[in-house]
Amino acid sequence: MIDLHCHLLPGIDDGSKDMETALRLAKEAVKNGITHALLTPHHMNGVYINHKSDVIRLTEKFQKEITDAGIELAVFPGQEVRINGNLLQSLDDDDILFADEGNKYLMLEFPDDDVPTYTTDMIYQLQMRGIVPIIVHPERNTKIMKHPELLFDLLAKGCISQITASSYVGTFGEKVETFTRQLIQAGQAYIFASDTHDLPGRKYEMNEAFKKMTVEFNKKLADEFKENAKFIINGDIVVPHTIQSVVGVSKKKKFGLF
Ligand SMILES: [Fe+2]
């Protein structure tokens, strides 16, 4: 299993506080069935800046520690990039890490409670550069929860969405869990990731999420989610879903008569 979003790298954001914690989480990841993990420290979120060269260097160091500890986990450098006005400049400066080596898939985060007004324009600019934005955990964004059409529009334009496994399992409460299920049902979800932080009450729930998906939906969809993660890290094409309606809004009937 591939995990495309986690905060394992020690001491650089609100993830693992030290190497010991990072190694413990790496062990938990393997126990949860994860074989490959993209390390995605926050970048440009107003609190944390984690430059590309630093993340690459720290990931190499962490991989060595993982291997020395006998943990069978392959880690890759990444970033969880907050949408911001300097993003295009940072791309020009080669300070952005993608989920894949070919610089196609960008793990893009919004503020927890907002989808900035310039988002559509920024997404267009990114797409003009051949980038496919992956909107991380839209199911936890309070503005998207209130206005699911915002996500619908971004997906219709060719973005991809990453759902946090714990959201689907119910760790963030029933509201988030229900919205997550609705997004999956509506074809508006593409992959699960752990978004692991070393926080109380947070643990790896990837396996649990996939088990639940197999019961509530089917194994085919769970397999598709796993395949999509592989396509993304390899820079291959993820087949876009046909999405027909905004979550929570029933399709308009012809003439509105029936
Ligand atoms: Fe994250």
Image (tube, grey):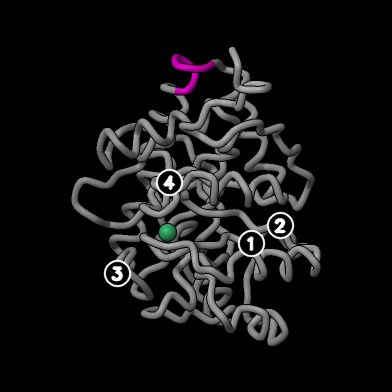
Q: Is residue 228 left or right of residue 37?
A: right
**Chief secondary structure of the magenta portion:** helix
Q: Is residue 57 above or below residue 62?
A: below
Q: Quadrant for the C terminus, please.
A: top right
Front residue of 105/255: it is 255
**Which mark is in front, 3 or 1?**
1
Residues under labels 4 and 1: Cα distance?
A: 17 Å
Sequence-wise, the earlier of marks 4 and 1 is: 1
Question: Which residue bears the numbered disc 2?
Answer: 132
Contact flag, marks 2 and 3 (Cβ < 8 Å): no
Sequence-wise, the earlier of marks 3 and 1 is: 3
Front residue of 120/174: it is 120
Residue bounds of the magenta highlight: 213-217
Q: Is residue 96 above or below residue 102?
A: below
Rendering coords of residue 206 (x, y %)? 43, 36
Mark 2, secondary structure of its residue: strand
Contact flag, marks 2 and 4 (Cβ < 8 Å): no
Sequence-wise, the earlier of marks 2 and 4 is: 2
Contact flag, marks 1 and 2 (Cβ < 8 Å): yes
Rendering coords of residue 67 (x, y %)? 49, 57
Mark 1, secondary structure of its residue: strand
Label 1 beta carbon less than 8 Å to ligand 1: no
Question: Which residue bears the numbered disc 4?
Answer: 194
Question: Which residue bears the numbered disc 1?
Answer: 106
**Which mark is in front, 2 or 3?**
2
Q: Residue at x 37, y 37 (%)?
A: 205
